[in-house]
Image: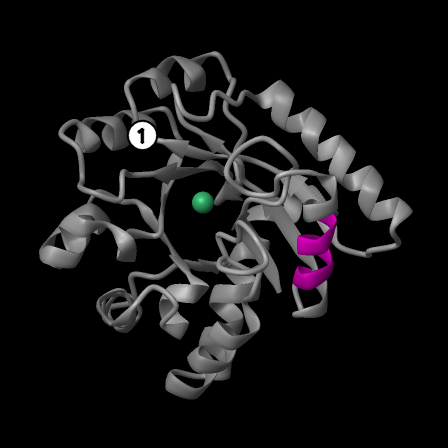
Amino acid sequence: MIDLHCHLLPNVDDGAKNIDESIALARAAYSSGITHVVCTPHIHEGYFDNNIDGIKQAHQLFTEALRSENIPLQSHFAAEVRISPSILKLVVSERLPFLGYLNSKPVLLLELPHSHIPPGTEQVINWLKSQGVVPMIAHPERNRDILANYGKASWLRGKGVLFQLTAGAITGTFGEKVRHCATRLLSDGFADVIATDAHNLHKRPPELKQAFEILQQQYSLDKAKELCIERPMEIAGCWFE
Ligand SMILES: [Fe+2]
């Protein structure tokens, strides 16, 4: 399986605190059947002021450690970018790392605040699309506006974005309301990719296998493969060839 959203890089955000934690997470990911990861640290102005150079550097450290620890996990880097007007100039100056490409268009992992869908979201999405960038909304099933009004998910989807659902939402780690929302998004065909959004070993582990099994039982093996292997590889496979 391939994980397109995780916080495995050391000391860049609220994920792995140091390289030892990164390695422990990488080991856990690999032993749960994840063979490839795209590490996606937060870029969130004023909270996690990461940039492409710092992320690249942390990723270099990470891949060196994977090699010296003999962990055969394949890795690349991107970012989980918080929606804000400042991302416009970062896109123009090519300062945002993409998850990969879908139909030759770059895919940007875009994070909304958990609390709501902020005013201006539609404008940012439209602008990104006008630049040829495909926004992939991270974990829509955990957004409180969407939890309160499912119509907002359909509305967002109608803007031509992709949806990344979190494995833990499908397994119930985030509670029944979130699980229900994730199930509805899946049933409506709104899920494009399942990822772990792993941050640590105890509460937010790099675990995809359980979600894969639930998808296989509730839908089909083909559906599980599409969301956990095929679509993610279609997007990020370019990094691993
Ligand atoms: Fe995340």
Magenta-colored stretch includes residue 26:
yes
* Quadrant assignment for the N terminus: bottom right
**Figure coloring:** one colour
Q: Position of residue 218 (x, y in %)?
A: 37, 85
- Using the image, determine if residue 147 lies above or below residue 87: below
- Ligand 1 quadrant assignment: top left
Predominant SS along the magenta part: helix
Q: Secondary structure at mark 1?
A: loop
CA neighbours of label 1 inside 10 A, class few (<14), some (14 to 19), many (20+) = many
Is 5 on the left or on the right of 189, as rendered?
right
Residue placed most toward the observer, 182 or 10: 10
Q: Is residue 46 above or below residue 233?
A: above
Q: Residue at x 36, y 72 (%)?
A: 172
Quadrant of res 232: bottom right
Residue 166 position in % (x across, y down) = 41, 59
Q: Which residues are magenta?
A: 23-29
Query: Which residue is rendered at x = 56% and y = 65% of the image?
Result: 207
Residue 54 sits inside the magenta stretch: no
Q: Can you identify the residue that label 1 sits on?
A: 83
On screen, residue 46 above or below 223: above
Q: For the residue marked with disc 1, what is the amino acid?
A: Ile
The x, y position of residue 116, in whole percent, is: 17, 41
Q: Is residue 46 left or right of residue 179?
A: right
Residue at 14% from the left image edge and 49% from the top image edge: 145
Q: Quadrant of residue 234?
A: bottom right
Residue at image point 50% right, 24% down: 96
* Badge 1 residue CB within 8 Å of ligand 1: no
What percent of the width, then of the height, locates residue 127?
27, 24
